[in-house]
Image (spheres, rainbow, N blue to C red):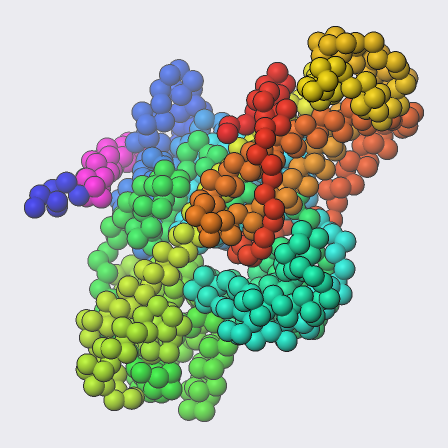
Amino acid sequence: MLFGLFDKNERLLKKYRKMVEKINAFEPEIEKLSDDELKNKTPEFKKRLENGETLDDILFEAFAVVREAAKRVVDMRHFDVQLMGGISMHEGIIAEMKTGEGKTLVATLPLYLNALTGKNCQLATHNDYLAKRDAEWMGPIYEFLGLKVGFIQAGMSKEDRKAAYEADITYGTANEFGFDYLRDNLVYDMDDKSQRGHYFAIVDEADSILIDEARTPLIISGPSDTPSELYRRFSHLSKNFENESDYTVDEKQKTISLTEEGIDKAEKLLQIDNLYDPENIKYLFHLLNALKARIFFKKDKDYIIKEGEVIIVDEFTGRLLQGRRYSEGLHQAIEAKEGVQIKQESLTYATITFQNYFRMYDKLSGMTGTAKTEESEFQQIYNCEVVVIPTNKPVIRKDKNDSIYQALKGKYNAIVAEIEERHKTGQPMLVGTTSIDKSELLSNLLKRKGIPHEVLNAKQHEREAEIIANAGQKGAVTIATNMAGRGTDIKINDEVKELGGLYVIGTERHESRRVDNQLIGRSGRQGDPGESRFFLSFEDDVLRLFGGERMKRIMATLRIEEGQPIEHKLLSNVIRDAQKKVEGIHFSMRKRLYEMDSVMDNQRNSIYNHRNWILKQEDYTEHLKEIFEDVADRISESAWDDKAGVINKDYVKGKLESFLIIADIKSESVSELKEELMTLLWDKFRGKKEEFGDHFNKMSKFIMLRIIDDKWRSHLDAIEHLKEAVGLRAYGQKDPNMEFKKESYYMFSQLVDDIYDTIVDYLMRITRVDPNKEESQAKKQTVNLNFVHGDTSVIDSQKKGQKSKKSYAEKKGFKRNTRFKVKK
């Protein structure tokens, strides 16, 4: 009953209002300063921080300084609500601010304040255009105050990229920031790294980047040697398989499972005895991919064909994702289905999810128009709360009830009639669709009626700025995919305000309520008038898949005739529940990805920390001695024959011969053998070191890095197969995540042993070579890499589990005496 008194959001706003009063109190004093005096505030603030003051101590005056600089340089003054948004982001909170509230200007406040520490502060946006635009738009404010600003662009040179990170404040896309982190952990020289830490980041459109795009990891990959013909073969074979009899489909989870009949058919067509034999598992993988490509991925909805290339359409923004490819062979399966050139499959060199990348920052915050509905996920994954910042002017837009029809035909007839009626008045309309083909369908219907209009989808993205600029003009009708639903600012003039402002028509509810809210938010900005309404049908995907049965029962109860619109609270509840179901499925997918990648995150950090340690050293003798001792220990323990109670000297001789060492073994105990082996190995190593002279350290550095990178790539590939395998274990009443955690830990221990064995083997066998060749061979591996924000769907398959016995590396805590450390 006292909930209102203790509402967390209102409590935060109350605190921020008091802080804004203190900032405003500085304004008269700051206004009187000359330009030089205002600029000198930056070194003054830095000095105060050096003398023990905190960022919170100087916040009020610093924000007042930024506000004054913005007035003088870009002729913009921060509103009080913008100051509140800036405070929340400084505190590591996601600020929900409605469209048109000036989030770009808000970000200057916390970015300036936190950059006073001398650490690089970053703002992550959706695309290169926004990163460059915002950096150039807001840059003069920072530069006036003596700070440097840079921006990252895809395809930027290594030198320009590094210079952008050397700046105090860096704008860039979330993708590029993540890829730069992965790239930095593939370098062979510390000077080649770009980033300088992860201190403070603001994520623009935080819900889209941190929630929606968190379902897909960032992947750096290189070419593989899988033959293209295999994809074509299975694309052709998949046409022989029929739904229900040969396989079953789960549309909600987007999975396919073969039936017994389907397995038999596959074995006959492939002329094999057992599809689930480890040697044949690749065939199952390719068959399921071919079926998924045929059933779930539709042309002009999920992708388009452009100049003989399959280009993915982002389901959240409606934009073309140039250069991105579905992973794990799915993209090649789609290319085979469409009969276009099949590009080589990729090997993963490095990967990370947005979840684990952005959790690296000391302080993370964000801003978006829609975040509150996902607050629990922001808290669970990123430890960020959400605060809803009030608008500068009240929202007066009229959001009307959904108008619902039984069939698609009735819905589209009603939409066209509504557009025709409103167009006569001159009121501009933005019509939101969920896919390219639906935008074009509606466009054709309007053409028949002779209604002039523009279409904004991924095929017309080059004219995006022009179309959006005119969308608020009198008489404008703009049909758009989700591209127009986020990050676009449609302005209207006084004449249009008199007509009721921009009218937003939604032609279908999206899977996420936030996407719907973003579309609605294009209207009614900054206190402008506006209107919105959604037209739906029972045949829409979200309602058909997740609310169909309830809808049919309500239809029967209400006795609704076809073509008659329905508005009823019961139906609104069904729609809301349907969207919640989809959001729940997506959350489960993100959570599973996060849990699995968190296990990998520990291993990734261990590998990357070890790499960084190697990059910083000048002499590797002591570290190599540890490696040799480790190998000698493992050979010795493996050589002991428990049954006979003696050393298996033939086994030891064989191991030594693999290192090109011929010797008679004299030891009779494990401890003696360890010393004897270490002496033999180390004596040969010293001979090699003398042979290479001054070049030895440089050569061993590249050898170690190349072996670590090779083995890590193989490990990542094995991990992908493990993800597929553990998914099936739920049928055996086992927790897939626990199974993944247990087995991946064992695999990592094997990886570390393998890295050490290979380093010793390489150094024992290497002959006199130019060390520069070793460097060029190592660096050659990071040429022609692909940068993918890939698909994360797990394809069902079977794979035999690893043995449960502990490896030597695991027993030794992943070589605690060296640099590998990982939690179990």
Asked if residue 653 is positioned above or below residue 193 in the image, the reply reads above
**Total numbered badges shown on the rendered structure:** 0
Q: Is residue 665 left or right of residue 421?
A: right
Which of the two residues, 596 or 810, is positioned nearer the viewer here? 810
* Segment tinted magenta in the rendering: 8-30
Q: Does the magenta stretch include residue 16?
A: yes
Q: Is residue 443 visible?
A: yes
Q: Percent position (x, y) of residue 596? A: 50, 42
Residue at left 45%, top 61%? 253
Q: Is residue 395 left or right of residue 465?
A: left
Asked if residue 350 is positioned above or below residue 613 in the image, the reply reads below
Residue 71 in which image quadrant:
top left
Which of the two residues, 125 or 787, is positioned nearer the viewer here? 787
Q: Percent position (x, y) of residue 334? A: 63, 67
Q: Is residue 665 left or right of residue 674?
A: right
- Outermost left residue: 1
Q: Can residue 720 be seen in this view?
A: no
Which of the two residues, 498 or 487, is positioned nearer the viewer here? 487
Asked if residue 32 is positioned above or below residue 617 in the image, the reply reads below
Which of the two residues, 112 or 384, is positioned nearer the viewer here? 384
Residue at left 37%, top 78%? 539
Q: Percent position (x, y) of residue 13? A: 22, 42
- Outermost front residue: 644
Residue 382 in which image quadrant:
top left
Q: Is residue 53 magenta?
A: no
Residue at left 67%, top 51%? 278
Q: Percent position (x, y) of residue 702? A: 77, 29
Residue at left 69%, top 69%? 268
Magenta highlight: main SS:
helix
Q: Is residue 314 left or right of residue 50?
A: right
